[in-house]
Image (cartoon, rainbow, N blue to C red):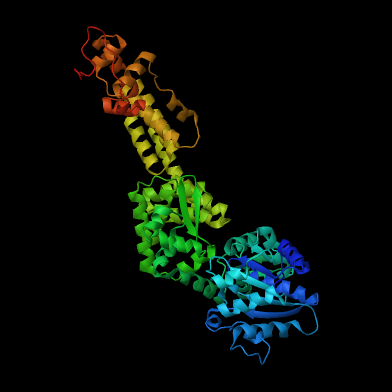
Amino acid sequence: MGRWPLVGRGPELERWAAALADPDCRGFVVRGAAGVGKSRLAEECLDRAAAAGFRVGRATASVAAGAVPLGAIAHLLPTGVDLSEPVAGFAVVARELAVGTGRQWVLFVDDMHLLDAASTVLLRQLMDTGVLLLIGTVSTGQPCGEAVTSLRRGDAVYEVDLTVLNSRQIEELLQVALGGPIDRRALHELSVASGGNVLYLRELVLGALATGELAGDGEIWHLRAGRLPGTARLTELIASRLATAGSAGQPVLELLALCEPLPLTDTEALASSQVLTALEQAGLIRVAQDRRRTTVSLAHPLYGEVLRAGLPVLRRRTLLLDQAARVAAHGARRRGDLLHIASWRLAATGTADPVLLAQAAVLARHAHDYPQTIALLRALPEKHRTTSTGLRLGDAYFQLGRWDQAEAVLARADALAVGERDRLAAALAADDPDQLLQAADACQSVGADLLASEAATAASAAWRKADQPRRATGAARRAASALARCEGARTPLSTAAQATASLTVREREIALLAAAGNSSKDIADTLALSVRTVENHLQHAYAKLGVTTRHELVQAVGASPSGRRPARSRPDSQPADRRPGP
């Protein structure tokens, strides 16, 4: 596959046409990140200048050539010119280049920011005298000396900023390059992996074609499922780019490759703000501000691929476990922290806390991250695999189109559910509240919350028939708790869990005051009741709520001791801050 077509650069080419038609124009500078197509655009501009009758030349600046005065453009200088006296010599060069047939010179200098000072002085002189029009490319994030900056000064120098391609432009480019349309999944994967960087996109396509991952059927190009292979050149390009981070910035890049995006504070634990600033200016990391939160990520998806491939096993393990510990030490307060901690520990050691794995799987499923959902659920030990985890695993396989695995997992989950239903049926037939609560325990232990709710509801009804209202209320509360985990699912039996005895207005008022930490005497003073009346109302509330202590009362009514309010005293009462009585 030869030189790729130029796609999506219409505005930049129009800008070049205006520059070429402007007799006062002295330069045209293309800025952009490495790999976005600066050189390709500049080559197209040079070709159009040649087609218009201009004399053209090319030069490539480099670190090696920059160490030699005029090293990058020496091949363009007329022979026999004495440059021992630069002022006179440069004037001779200008006269020699000005003579001859054809129009003005157009010179393309790639990586202009690497030019040596002598070259920039000569080029600026040639520009100012109208001998040549300079086309130059400059990589963003790279330092430019004062001499090179002088080539870009003034209204006579046009500049364009080249950005990455969007998905529509990538689709157009691939269709022209491949000679046919490409399917949506392949387009999406190539777009995401390349990040719109034309150089990376080209290498990914070449690698996929070489391995057969990308193939056409005569009508459309398809990408087989699996990892995009890329090419050795792509890996070398990215590795060379990452090497500019130095030893101080490398730990940050490695951690981001495994755990991105991360809060800025987490990256500051590994490197100073000066190092992070340098990484951002070099275009290796991206820092984003979202209200009060600042996050850091790698500037390109392929950076992570190359970094992960080069990480030794023990170094990877250390980075992952340290980051998991760092987030856990902060209290895992942010949304998604549980998912991240479980995923990092699983990747580091092959295992993690089963409860954390199950919680993380729910979060991953909610985010439609089905591969991660599968990885988390498959890591669960056998004794922690429940009906609900089986259903989630089967659903994740189904969403990915892995039908055989989905059917096998769902069949096992169904068999487990049948056993749970049989146990519940036996307990219902016996109408034994203790046996029903044991069935509820068994159902809950395997994640069958709806069956657990039914069993606890039946136990509540059995306790009521046995004239045990406190136990009945406790079982009903347990049934309601299990039902709340069922995401809106209801059955006739489980619905009865909500029909628990309710408190009267006065009972609830007194219960709330008691749960807030007020004594019976204070409550009596506040409500102008006798202490005995308060105690009677509390006993009724205890029975209805299925509790026996004030600590349990706090949980039952959802109050907090910190919310206690001062009792209102009558004139003949004791001071409000005195708390006699239980």
Q: In the picture shown, does residue 521 fall above or below 330?
A: above
Q: In the picture shown, does residue 348 fall above or below 263?
A: below
Residue lying furthest bottom in this view?
Answer: 80
Residue lying furthest left in this view?
Answer: 580
Percent across and percent down for residue 165 are 65, 61
Indicate left or right for 357 with 131 as reference.
left
Percent across and percent down for residue 352 are 36, 55
Q: In the picture shown, does residue 163 fall above or below 79?
A: above
139 and 407: which one is in front? 139
The part of the image, by quadrant, that contains residue 201 is bottom right
Say which residue appears at 60% left-offset and 70% top-offset: 150
Percent across and percent down for residue 335 are 44, 45
How many numbered badges does the structure rendering display? 0
Indicate left or right for 281 with 535 as reference.
right
Indicate left or right for 552 with 117 as reference.
left
Q: In the picture shown, does residue 112 fall above or below 416?
A: below
Percent across and percent down for residue 336 are 44, 48
357 and 31: which one is in front? 31
Q: Is residue 468 visible?
A: no
Say which residue appears at 34% left-offset and 58% top-offset: 322
Q: Quadrant of the N terminus?
A: bottom right
Residue lying furthest top in this view?
Answer: 572
Q: Is residue 6 visible?
A: yes
Say which residue appears at 57% left-offset and 73% top-offset: 147
Q: Quadrant of the C terminus?
A: top left
359 and 108: which one is in front? 108
